[in-house]
Image (spheres, rainbow, N blue to C red):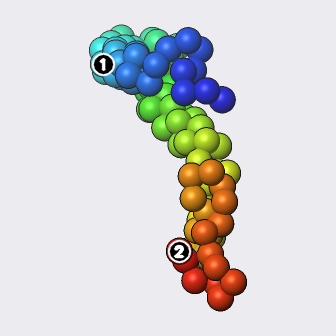
Amino acid sequence: MTAEIAGLDPLQLDTIAFVVLLSVLPLVSYGAVQGIVPLWAFGLALLVAGALVPLVTELALREDEDDEDGENEDDEDGENEDDENGENNEDENGESA
């Protein structure tokens, strides 16, 4: 996945999700008061969709960051002391230069 999902940046996706969430309350309220089951059911489906968009966007961005940084991460105990060129700067005693 890329940082831009479907050609939109994350702020645009979050804005769309916010607008969808704003439309939920009137749909569910009107559908429930008038007894229109498909309308309030559609409103509840929009609630779920609007709530999932920011989560999916965050996971996609986090996955992209992990992919980009995954090659240069240090070992768990910090023993990977390569310089910018990928060369190890340790002498024969294992001490850093």
Instruction: Give the residue drawn at x 62%, y 51%.
Output: 85
The local crowd at label 1, few if under 14, some if 14 to 19, many if 20 or more residues have their Cα within 10 Å, is some
Q: Is residue 93 left or right of residue 11?
A: right
Instruction: Give the residue drawn at x 53%, y 36%.
Output: 61
Position of residue 54 relative to residue 74, above or below, is above
**Residue 31 falls in image quadrant:** top left
**Residue 19 falls in image quadrant:** top left
Across and down, in percent, residue 14 comes to 39, 24
| Amino acid under disc 2 | Ala
Circle 1 is placed at which residue position?
A: 22
Label 1 or label 2, whichever comes before in sequence order:
1
Circle 2 is placed at which residue position?
A: 97
Q: Is residue 41 left or right of residue 32?
A: right
Instruction: Give the residue drawn at x 30%, y 19%.
Output: 22
Across and down, in percent, residue 81 comes to 58, 68
Residue nearest the observer in this picture, 14 or 3: 3
Across and down, in percent, residue 7 comes to 55, 12
| Total number of numbered discs in the rendering | 2
